[in-house]
Image (tube, rainbow, N blue to C red):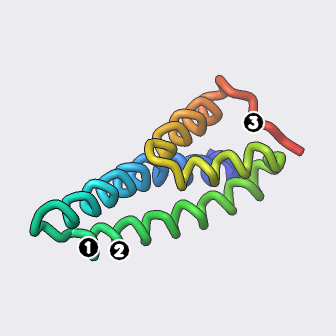
Amino acid sequence: MDVNSSAVHRLRLISAPEGISFILLLICSVLKRTTSFDAVPVMGMVHGILFILYVVFWIQAWQAQRWDAKRGVLLFVLSVLPFGGFVAERMLGREERGELRPATA
């Protein structure tokens, strides 16, 4: 595994957990307002850490792969959308397997 593919691999590995934590945080937010259950502080911290890791790995992968702006911004936007982390993971997996030609500048 070369440097470029390992950067993509790290980003891919963090995409799904980041997406799951975002959805769980949204669920916890609803539960906080509708019940006495309040896991927002814990899920907020978990999601925050995973999001920071996603951003760090996203920057490393963008630099290593030399993605064009469209691809780089798309992968960031996916990180802030519910279920976007799963779409990013699928895209990155296809790129790793060579099924999707990486967009380069």
Which residue is found at the position 54% from the left and 60% from the top? Answer: 54
Counting labels gives: 3
To which quarter of the image does residue 58 belong? bottom right
In this figure, which residue is indicated by the disc labeled 3?
102
Q: Tag 3: Cα neighbours inside 10 Å, few (<14), some, or many (≥20)?
A: some
In this figure, which residue is indicated by the disc labeled 2?
45
| Residue 78 picture location, percent across and down | 57, 47
What amino acid type is highlighted by mark number 1? Val
| Residue 48 picture location, percent across and down | 43, 70
Q: Quick one: label 2 or label 3, which is nearer the N terminus?
A: 2
Q: Tell me if I can see residue 29 in this picture.
A: yes
Question: Mark 2 and 1 residues: CB-CB less than 8 Å, in contact?
Answer: yes
What amino acid type is highlighted by mark number 2? Met
In this figure, which residue is indicated by the disc labeled 1?
42
Which residue is found at the position 83% from the left and 46% from the top? Answer: 68
> Image height check: is 76 above or below 98?
below
- Looking at the image, which residue sits at the far front? 34
> Image height check: is 49 above or below 93?
below
Instruction: Say left or right for 103 vs 50.
Output: right
> Image height check: is 9 above or below 87?
below
Which of pointers 2 and 3 indicates the residue nearer the eye? 2
